[in-house]
Amino acid sequence: MTDPVRYDREGDVALITVANPPVNALGHAVRQGLVAAIERFEADDARIAVILGEGRLFIGGADISEFGKPPADPWLPDVVNRIEAATKPVVAAIHGAALGGGLEVALGCHYRVALPGTKLGLPEVTLGILPGAGGTQRTPRLTGLPKALEMITSGTPVDPKTAQEIGLIDRVGEGDARSAGLAYARDLLEQGAERRPVGALPKPAADADAVAATEATLQKTAKGLVSPFHAMKAVVAASEMEIDAGLAEERRLFNELMETPQREGLIHAFFLERKVSQLPEIDGVAPRELSKVGVIGGGTMGAGIATAALLAGLTVTLIERDDEAAAKARGTIEKNLAGAVKRGKLAEAKRDAILSDAFATSTDYSALSDADLAIEAVFESMEVKKEVFGQLDAVMKPGAVLATNTSYLDIDEIAGSTSRPADVIGLHFFSPAHVMKLLEVVVADKTANDVTATAFALAKKLRKIAVRAGVCDGFIGNRILSHYRGAADRMVLEGASPYQVDSALRDFGFAMGPYAVADLAGLDIGFMTRQRKEATRDPRDVVPTWADELYHMGRLGQKTGRGYYIYEGGARTGEPDPEVEALVAQAREAAGVIPRSFTDGEIQRRYMAAMVNEGARVVGEGIAQRPLDVDAVKLFGYGFPRYRGGPMKWADMTGLAGLLDDIRAWEKDDPYFWAPAPLLEQLVSDNTNFDSLNGWER
Ligand code: T1G
C-alpha cells in the first residue's frame, strides 16, 4: 500500500500531502504519516510546511469506520498537538472540504488558506459526538464564543468568505490547493512570519448571553439529542480553562458521547445513507439516458414530482386530461417553485428560466414521444393505471422508462399490461414529493437492471435517498406502517388513549405520534385504505371504528380543523378532543372490551415490536433486501428518530432476544397479530442480529 502521506520539497517549502481516497479520512496510517512528516520537516532545512489533501477535498475527518474499534496510537488529538508544536510555521491549504478532524488538523496549523467553494465545518454532533481533536478549544480562540457555539452545536459548515470574516482562516486562495498553499507560504516567508499556535491564543471571552441563546435554540432544534448539549459544554469550557485543561475536558465529554447509543444510531444512519444505493444488480450497470421527463397527472403528487424534476435540472412535460386541469397543475408547480425561491433554494431568474424553457403541459400523450422517462401519478385505480400505461406504451420511444407512482397497486400487473414490461418500474414518492427525501424504487419481476440503475440515477439527480423494494401491498414503508398502526389501534381498543399513544411516541423521538400523523395526512386517506382492504381483511384485524365515525362526521383532521385533535384557527398542533375519547369508549363497549391502563414504556415497546416484527418479515420475504433498507425507509420517509438509527438498528441495540420474548408473551393473548417473524426467530436462535445481514465491507 502506498504511503497515505507524502513529503515533497518545493524550494524552501515542504509539501505534506494526504492521499487516502475517497475522502482522505484520518485513519491510523494517515495519523502516523502526518506525525512522521512533521518530524521530517523539523529535521530538514525547509523553512515552512504546507499540508494539503490530494483529490477532491482536504480531509473529510476522522475515519468513522474505526469507531468502536480499539484506538491505535497516535490518537488524533495528539497528531494535531504535534502539528501545532512544530518548530517552524505550518500552513493548511484547504480545498473541497475540511470537516471534523480535517478542520481540526487545519486548526493545528499556524496559518490557513482555503479555496472558494470549500466546506469548512465541525459536523460531529450529527454523528452523536463532538469535535474531539481540539476543535472545541481552538475554534473559539479564533472566532470568539458565539460563532464557535453556533458552528459546533449545529454542525453546519461555513464557506471560505464567512470563515475568513469570523477569523477561522486567514486567506481565500486562488488556483488549486498546491499553488495557493505555495503562494501563501512564500508570502509568509517574505513577511518573516513566525509559527503561531492557535492553542497559545488567549481564552475566548465568556459570553453568558450567547450560551443562553444557544441553549434556547437547542431546546427547540435538538430535542432528544445528547451531543449538541455536550458540545456546548465543551466550547464553554474554552472560555473558563487554559488550553490543556480545556482539551482534557473536551476529551472527557467526547468519551462520554462515544458510549451513547445515539452515537451508534447516528453513525449507522450516516453509513446506510451511502450504502442503500449500493446493490449488486446495478453494480457497474450503466443507467439509460435521463434528461427529458414526462409526468402524467398534475395533482398534488404529480405536481410535486414535476417540481422535483425541474429543480434537478430536468425538462418536464406534464400531461393532464384537459386544459383546465393542466393550468391548475402549472399553478401548483409555480407555487412550489415560489416556495423554493422564498426558502433561498432557487434564484428568481432560474425559476423564470425553468418555467419558460424547461416546463410544458399538454393534453396529448404524443408530446412524450421523445421523453426518456414517464412517471404516472394518476388516481389509484388499476383500470385507470392500465389505460395510462397503454397510452405510454403506444407513444414512448424504445428504451424509454415507464414508471408508476402507485403506493400499493400491483406493479407486475401494470407492467404485464404493456408490450415492454422490462421497461416498467415503480417510483413511489412521498408527499410533498419535492421535499421528502425518500423514494421507494419498486422493482417488478421483469424490470431490467438498467431500468433499476436509471431509477437510482434519477434519485441521485433529485438528491433523494432511493431504497429498492419488491412488489407487495404497501411495498416496504406502508406495509410496515399498517402493522404498527394496527398495534396502536389495538392498544387504543384495549384501553390506551390515542393522546397517550402519541405523547409516548413523541417521547421516543418521533416528531408526531400516529394519530397526529393521521390528522396531517387526512382521515379520509385512512378511511379509503380501510374501504379498499375490506374485501380481503382478516376478521381478526382491529378496525378503528372511531376513525370511521370521525370520517362520517366530516372530521378529516388538520384540513377540516378537527380530527383526532381540535385545531383552533388553523393551528398545526391540536388539542385532544374529549369527543374522540367518547367514540373510543363506545367502540370498546361494542367490542366487549374492559379497558386497562398502559404505561408509556409498554406503548413504545409494543409499537416498536410491531414495526420490527413486520420489518423482519419484509426482509425475510426479500421485499427489502437488507435490514438497512427498512431503516432507510423509516428514517427518510416516516420520521423515525435518526439518533436511533432506524427500527432494525434500534432492535439490535435493544436486544433481539428480549424483543422476541415480549412478542411471544403477547402472542399468547393474540396469536394472529403477534406471530413472530421467522427471520427474527432465526437470528435469535443463531445468536446474531439484523446488522449481520447488511453486508458492510468496513
Ligand atoms: N470516515 C470514513 N469513511 C468516510 C468518511 C469518514 N469521515 N467520510 C466519508 N466516508 C466514506 C463514505 O462512507 C463513502 O464510502 C465514501 O467515503 C464517499 O463518501 C475527532 C471524531 C466528506 C462531504 O462527519 O460528510 O472527525 O459508500 O459518498 O458525497 O473530531 O462524505 O463509497 O463505501 O459521502 O463526496 C467528521 C463525513 C468525522 C464528514 C464527501 N466528518 N463525510 O461527500 O462522498 S468525526 C464528517 C461527509 C471526526 C474528530 C471526529 C462526506 C464528504 P462508500 P460520500 P461525498
Image (cartoon, rainbow, N blue to C red):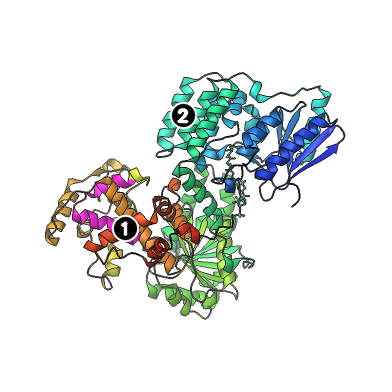
Residue 303 can be seen, yes or no: no
Report the span colored magenta. Answer: 479-505
Q: Which of marks 2 and 1 precedes in the sequence?
A: 2
What element does badge 1 sit on?
helix
Callout 1 amino acid: Asp
| Residue 604 to residue 51: above or below | below
Residue drawn where x is 43% and y is 39% of the image: 225
Residue marked by disc 2: 214
User: Magenta stretch: residue 493 in it?
Assistant: yes
Pick the residue in front: 66 or 599.
66
Q: Residue 202 is drawn in which quadrant?
A: top right
Residue drawn where x is 24% and y is 53% of the image: 555
**Callout 1 environment at 10 Å: few (<14), some (14 to 19), or many (20+)?**
few
Residue marked by disc 1: 661
Magenta-colored segment: predominant secondary structure: helix
Residue 235 image position (x, y, % from top left): 53, 27
Residue 71 image position (x, y, % from top left): 59, 42
